[in-house]
Every structure is written in C-alpha cells, then in structure tokens.
Amino acid sequence: MNENKLSGNEQLRLDIKKAYPGFQMEVALKVNRGEIFSLVGPSGCGKTTLLRLIAGLEQPDRGTIVLDGREITTLPPAHRRVGLVFQDYALFPHLTVAGNIEYGLKVQRLPAPDRRQRLAELLALFGLEGLAHRQIQHLSGGEKQRVALARALAPKPLLLLLDEPFSALDYSLRQRLRQELKKLQAKLGFTAIFVTHQQEEALSFGGRLGVMENGRLVQAGTAEEVYENPATPFVAGFLGEANLLPCSVEKKKGRARIRLGSNDCFTLPLPENFPPGEYLLMMRPEDLSPDPALAGRVTGKIETLEYLGSGYRLEGRCGAGIIRAFIAKKYRNLREGDQITLGFDPRQIKLFPASAPDGGGPSRPVDNSPGI
Amino acid sequence: MKDGNCEGVRSHTREKRPLAGRLYRAYRAHTRWRAREKRHAGRNPVYLVLLLLFYLPVLFLLVKVFLSTGFRQELTGFLRSELFWNTLSFSCRQALYSAGLSLLLALPGAYFFGRFDFPGKRLLRSAMVLPFMLPGILVVLGMVVFYGNNGALNHWLALLFPDRGWRFTGLYGFWGIILAHVFYNFTFCLRLTGEAWERINPALHEASALLGAGPFFTWRRITLPLLAPTLLYLFLLVFLYSFLSFTVVLVLGGYLYKTFEVLIYIEYSSRLRFDRAALIAMVQLFLLAGFLYLQALAGRRLRRGGLFTGTLPPLKFRDYPWRTILFLLYLAFVGFFFLSPLAAVVARSFFSRGLPGALPTLENYRLLLTDGFRFAVGRSFTSVIAASTGLAVTVAFLTVSLAYYLARLRRDCPWGGADLWLQLPLGVSFVTFSSGLSLLAGRILPSGLLILWAQLFLAFPLVYSMLRTARRELGESLLEAAALLGASPSRILQTVELPLMRPALSTAAAYAAAFSLGDLAAVLMLGRGRVVTLSVAIYRLIGHYRFPQAIALGTLFILISLVLFLLMEGRSRPRLQDVFPRPEEAEEE
C-alpha cells in the first residue's frame, strides 16, 4: 500500500516528532481539501513550530508529512508549494505592494504578461488596486495583512498556513478581516491551517479545529464537537469558560449519586460499568441558572457579580470550590454576599477522572452520555 | 463627630500647605528654567562661539585664497598641473581600492554576525571599534613591524620556506597604503554591515524560500537590496576617510604617493608655501563637498532596512557544520591580519633591538629614557608623556563639558539645523582646518592653545552626537520627579542627572582623549616642533629608523589605547548614527 496515498478528501496528513531541549512535539493531523483548519492553543504549545515543520523551515526528527499525495518531509521549503502568512507579515520592505505580490511569480519565471494578469487579479481580489505602487511602510495594518495574504496565494500553493495573522490588529479590524478571509476561502477554495491562541477566532471559522497542548494535538473535530465534548479538562478550560469541580460518584440501586463538596448531591443515570470514585465535574457557566426547577443543584455564596449588558457573570464559592455562571438579567436583585442555589441539567455535565489533573495530557472524559 | 472629622482634615491641610507650596515653587522653578533654556537654545553664546571657532579658520582660509593676487592663474595653473591630476588619480584609486576591499573582506564576517549568535559575539563586536580608535601612527608602526621588509612576516616566510626566497616587499607603496587603510576601516565595516544584516528579519528569507526562491535568488533580490544602502554608505565613508588619509600616506607613501592632505602638509611645513597650501586646501574642500553630497544621498536611504530585534539561531557545529568551519577559518584569518601587527609591536618590544629571534630584554624601554631618544624626538620621554596626557585630558574635559552643555540645552529640540552645523566639521579635512587655523591665529596664539583648538574641532562632532543622543534618551520624567520632590535645579543636576549620565560622559571623554592622542596632523602643523606628543614621537623615531624605541613607545601607546577602550566598553557605546551622523536624523525625530 502506498503510504503517500491520502484517503478521500485529505489534502494534508502528518505524523511527526520533533524534540527540543525541554520540549517535545508529537503531532498527528489530517486536514481536508478546501477547509480552514484552526489550530488553537496557549502560547508556547508548539503551534508555530508545527507550521514551521509543515513549511519545511524546520525538520522533524521522525515521521512523515504528505501533502496532496506527495511526501514532502525532506523537501526544502522552496519546493513544497506551501504558502505562509507570518505573524508580522514579513513583507519585503524594499519592494512595493506589487513587487511583494509578484515576487513568487517571478521566482516561478512566469512570462511577464501572465504575471501582470495574475497580479491584476490578485490586486482586484484583495482590493489593493490603488496601492500597487505604494511602499510597504506606508500601508496600514489591514492593508499589510491583505498584501501578505495575496503574496502567499499568488503562486497558488497547495496549502496556506496562517500564523496568527490578525494578532497585531485591533478588535474590529480583526473581526472584519476574519470575515473577509472566510469569504475569500469560500470563493477560491484553498486549504488553510489557521493558527491562533484566541478561542473566539478559532471557533468563528466554523470548520474543524484542533487544540494543542505541550506539543501535542489533544483534540481535533468540529468547533461544536470540541466545545460540547472536550476531551480533557484542559480543552474544556481553554475553549470557552468551564467550571471544573472535584466530585465523588457513588453507585446506589443502578443510579449514580454525585456528591459535590459536603452539601450538594444529585443523581445521574450512568452506564452499568461506570466505576464509582473521585472525578472532576465539568459544566459550562451558561448551563447554570438560579432556576429551582432544574435537577442538579449547587449552593454557594456570591463573591463577585459583574454586569455584562446581556446579563450577569457570577462567581461564587460552593463546597467544592469556585463556581462561575452567566445568569439572565431577570436576576438583577441578587447581591454580592447572597446565598444562591444554582441549578443545572445533569445531562449537560462531563466527568473526567480525577487522576488527570487540569492540563494533564490526553486523558479522555468518562463516557457518561449513554442511558441519560 | 462630623465636625471633629472636618477639623481633622482642615488641620491636616494646614500642616501640609507649606510643604506643598515649597514643592510647587520648586517644580515651577524647574519648568520656568527649562522653558528659558529652550527659548535660548539656538542663540546661546557657547553655541555661537563654537560655531565661530569651527568655521572661522576655514572661512579665513577661503577668503585669503580668493583675495590673493593672481588667484585665478594660480588655480588654473594648479588644476592643469601634473601634480594635481596625479594626486587626484592616486587619491581616488587608493580610496576606491580601500573601500572596495574593506567591504569585500567585511561581507563574509557580516553574514555570520548578522545571521547567527555565537559565544563571544558581543565582545568581538566591541573589539571591532579598537582599530578605528587606534592612533594612525600606531597602525603604521604595526604595519612596518609586521609587514615591513624586515618585519615578522618576512622573518616567518624565511623560516618556513628557506629556499624559496619569498618576501613581501609591497608595504612602502600603493598596496601598503591599501593594506593599512583596510586594516583601519575593515572592522567597522564588518560591525556596521553585521548590524544592518542583523536588523533584516530572518522571516523575509523564509518568506522568500516559501515563495520558491533559492538561496542565490533570495540573496540577490532580498538581502542585497536591503543591505545596499548600508554598503553604499560605508563605501563612500571609507572612500572619504581614505581620500583624506594623512598619517598612513605620509609614512608609507614616500615621494611617489601623496593625498591632498599630505600635499597641503608638505607645501605648508616643508616648502613654507602657505598660499599654495591654502589653495590646495580650498580645491580639496570643493572636492569633498561633492563626496559629502553623495554620502548624504546614500545616508538618506539607510532607514529602509528592517527592524528585526529577535533572537538569532546559535552557530553550532552540530547544526551548521560547514558554516562553523568557515567562520572559524574567517576568524583565524581576521585575527592574523589584525592582531599580528599589534602583537608584533608588543612582542618585539621585548627583544634586543626589536629584532625577531634576538634575546629577550627590557633594553628598548630603557632606551626611552636616554639622550638618544631626546636627540631623535626633541623632547625627553617624560615631557612627551606629560604633553600627550595633558593635552588628552584637557581636550577630553573641554570637549565633553561644552558638548554636554549644548546637548543639555537642546535636549527638547528635535535633531535639526543647529545640530547639523556642529556636525559639519566631520566634512572638513583636518589638515585644511589646521592650515586655516595657523593662518588665522598662528602668530597670535601659542602652539599648545592652537593644538587644543584644533583637537576640539576634531573630537567635538562625535562627542556631541553621543551626548546629545544619551541626554535625549534620559528623558525628563526622572528629573521632573526630583523637582516635584522639592529638589532645586542644581541639586537635580548633582544627584540625578550627572550620576545617570556618567557612563555616557566617561565614554565620550575616552573617545575625545583617544582622538587627541592619535592626532598627528595638528601637532605637526601647529606645534611648530615645540609640542611633541606620543604620535609625533613615534613618527620621529620611525623617521630616524630608531625602531627599538618606536616599538617600545608603541607598546605603551597600545596599553593606553587599551585602557581607553576598556573605559568605552561596557558603558554606552556610540550607535551608527552617533559615529557617522546622517541627514535623515532630522526626519526620524
């Protein structure tokens, strides 16, 4: 069997290892053709290193990288047909906008008429027509970002890598450019890996995303899958806000009794083979509400209450630790220091083995969904 | 209860009011004093006197030449003479070769400095200022001792290849002058090109590679264009320095090779044709104006380089085996080229009669205290040392005091025209200035004062530029904080400003002292034989073929230079724009 053969719609497949002093990277990843795969993780988790390994700017110690059915593991960057948009854009400061965009085309020795035509297309596509002869120093952040994107796409790469391309921009511009990138990708259909450390950015592309931690890809899937079913407490905490509380599970007459601290307990139907013991309970703050009708309950004292416009963000201390909740405006009579009982639907909680501390590697959540 | 509280607040306010008043008055005094300083910065008498001191001699020389009888005939006669064309041709040729070879030799080193980190990089980079700061006569001495006919190199060649008869005999001539100029200029070319290379973001090379470009294409299209302004600027700078070369050409050029500087000196000091010397100085001044214009154009493009300040990959044998080997070979070659002449001076000063292979001795140092030395030099060893150190200390003190006074006065003003006027002395040849000064005040002022004046002119631009930058970087917030705490302006100066500025001040003083110690032209032209410094003493000893004493004195001189270098190192170092101010500084600020 040919190892380089990619299955179905796969554009990139890699399984590589790279060791640095005090840091080890071990990643297996598949990216489908025509998708924007978001790679998210905290600073220093190895996102940029992974991009550099794919681009050929660094060499893996072991493993293979297959792009479009061709193994590129040992190929120099120039022969990989991979485009990269750098975090600081890395635009050539001595060249104009047009000079930057057509640089790759000149390298390819494209005939001048074809080159000019491609340049005009790209300038029009990125709304840079009026800036073709402008020096890079005289561009705004958003314009630079567009030039960097146009330059990377000009030689028609098989894969586009975007290394936190919006990190230097302000919030509103970031949002606008994100939308533009989505539209552009839909129009051109290129395959891209988008690296970011901002969960909002990763979720906004709507495609698949991967969460990295300490040089490992901890979980990959659609944004909804990863958010709703985090593989580890780290993923739960990194992607969105999560309450992670220690709890104990006791079995009684086929039903599980979950004890949170000394005061709160509720029952949950669990599979037959579900082992009792100590666990880490995860629930999202938006799933908590001071609604007495809900089956699960946790009581505590409100420590801080922040007005968010659309509602309140509440932080309180319960028997098991700190708990956070987003609550509706109608609970405006609550005050800091008040006792509160927050209810939740037990089906929305996740249980992780307590032996896997927060951020403790690729431990899977306990499957507590069947039978509920 | 409420009343009681109110009373408490009132009494608290009453207690504090005098202190608050004092603080307010002190702060107001500080701001008023600053506003007054700023208003009068451009019209300050010190500033005007300095401009007068710097420009009057040159203006006097020009006026004297223009008003002299038969000026036109003299000028056309000189411009048509073989002497003019030979001098111009030699000056340009040797300057072209010197600049080209300096850059060519610097480029490989700049690559390693610009693209990698390696142990000792900072120290090596600092040491690169040393040849530039070495007195010209010491460089010449090192060249003679190492590359000369009876030098260490020929001694080694004879030992290694006894039957081949290989000898290097080119020191006293065109290539010897080039060698000395490359020795002088190569290291700062390496340092500045390396720094420019370092500022190019490595991501640009990576971006180029990802767009499909090979190393050569990337070098030609990305690296070279980004380095080009620095290379062009340095080329013109080395060209200018070599064009104005005095000491090297005076000693190594013999009768055949002369720059305009040497020609002016010969006309002035040997032939006593003052008008002729002034005429040549004027011609050179106009030639220089052209070069300076070109240099200013090149300087304007310097800002284009990147602004990368990140970390570079370490140069390790495991990761870059070939490059590590090449770098070590390069370092060995550069070390041999640069350290050997100076090491030869030091080593041979401990051998009998300064000859390689002779018995080790301190005889050469003892000879410095004999009548032989006094006969050759014209002064005793102690008076030479006293004159040199006295001049160096006075020049350092005067230059630093005046420069700091003005830098402080103009700290709120952006770099502009008033500063450029103080920088222009860099573009006037030192021999031209000295001859103008001699014509203006040679009969009125004593030699010592004339030399002091000339050396102030020589050292001021760099010292001012360094202190101006350092003072602006200090800012005002700390001084304002002190004023708000009630300190008077003089107390702020003593307790905050001067302690913070001490590193920059001592570095500037070291540079000024190094300039004074290394100066040969002003002492020769204005000293009238009565003032003998270390440089003049070595020059005379070489002239009298008393090499044992020359190398012993040279070793002492190296020691002094080393001490000055150590004073500069570890403190604030001048930046590219401090040493070689550029016109775009005004735009930057």
Image (cartoon, coloured by chain):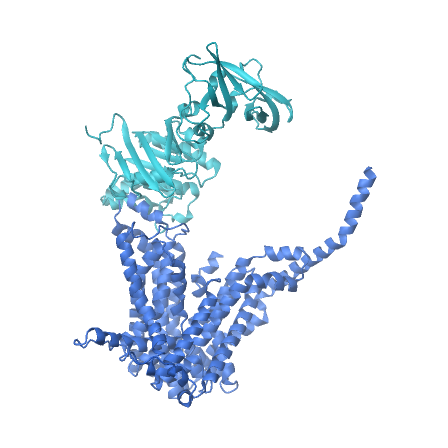
Q: Is residue B362 visible?
A: yes
| Image point (17%, 75%), residue name | B164
Q: Which chain is blue?
A: B
- Residue A339 position in % (x across, y down): 63, 22
Residue, far left: B163
Above or below, comparing residue A189 to residue B67 in the picture: above
In this view, the residue in front, B143 or A363, is A363
In this view, the residue in front, B305 or A16, is A16
Residue, far top: A253
Left/right of residue B314 with respect to residue B461 in the rendered view: left
Q: Quarter-wise, where is residue A58 in the image?
A: top left
- Residue A50 position in % (x across, y down): 34, 38
Left/right of residue B42 with respect to residue B274 in the rendered view: right
Above or below, comparing residue B269 to residue B195 in the picture: below
Q: Is residue B147 visible?
A: no
Left/right of residue B399 with respect to residue B65 in the rendered view: right
Q: How many marks?
A: 0
Q: Quadrant of the N terminus of chain B?
A: top right
- Residue A60 position in % (x across, y down): 29, 40
In this view, the residue in front, A16 or A74, is A16
Above or below, comparing residue A134 to residue A283 in the picture: below
In this view, the residue in front, B23 or B84, is B23
- Residue A184 position in % (x across, y down): 35, 32
Q: Which chain is cyan?
A: A
